[in-house]
Image (cartoon, grey):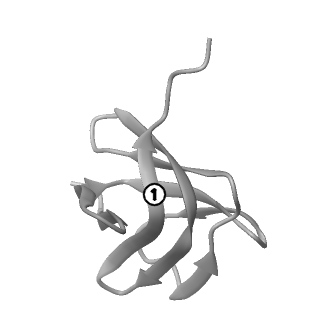
Amino acid sequence: MAQQLHVELVAVEEKVWSGEAEMVVARTTEGELGVLPGHAPVLGQLAEPSQVRIKQPGGQQLAYDVAGGFLSVTGEGVTVLAESATPATPAR
């Protein structure tokens, strides 16, 4: 079994999503950041507007439009703290 990340996506008012993922991609003020298991610790400010994409085991991908906030990567996993987070509408 491949290594996985524990991911928490939290908005001001609620926990939006929590679970295991193979990869997380987010756009920070420094550029787009892809996080895989074993990534070095980092703290980044999310760009506005931004989108966080979570690749789950099995290949399913979740996407959330986020406004404001931070991305924190630690040895325990990834936490996204956003002012707001809503499921992204699929591109047409």
Residue to which mark 1 is pinned: 84
Judged from this view, the residue extending furthest toward the right is 30
Measured along the vertical axis of the image, is residue 58 above or below residue 12?
Answer: above
What's the amino acid at mark 1? Answer: Ser
Measured along the vertical axis of the image, is residue 64 above or below residue 35?
Answer: above
Residue at 43% across / 77% down in the picture?
38
Residue placed most toward the observer, 52 or 87: 87
Residue at 45% across / 57% down in the picture?
84
Residue 91 at what x, y percent from top left? Answer: 60, 19
Residue placed most toward the observer, 37 or 65: 65
In this rendering, the count of numbered labels is: 1
Residue 30 at what x, y percent from top left? Answer: 78, 73
**Quadrant where the N terminus lies?**
bottom left
Q: Callout 1: few (<14), some (14-19), or many (20+) C-alpha neighbours within 10 Å? A: some
**Quadrant where the C terminus lies?**
top right
Label 1, secondary structure: give it: strand
Residue 34: quarter of image: bottom right
Residue at 76% across / 70% down in the picture?
29
Q: Is residue 92 left or right of residue 74?
A: right
Q: Is residue 35 left or right of residue 61?
A: right
Residue placed most toward the observer, 9 or 84: 84
Residue 76: quarter of image: bottom left
Residue 71 at what x, y percent from top left? Answer: 51, 74
Residue 21 at what x, y percent from top left? Answer: 32, 54
Judged from this view, the residue extending furthest toward the front is 13
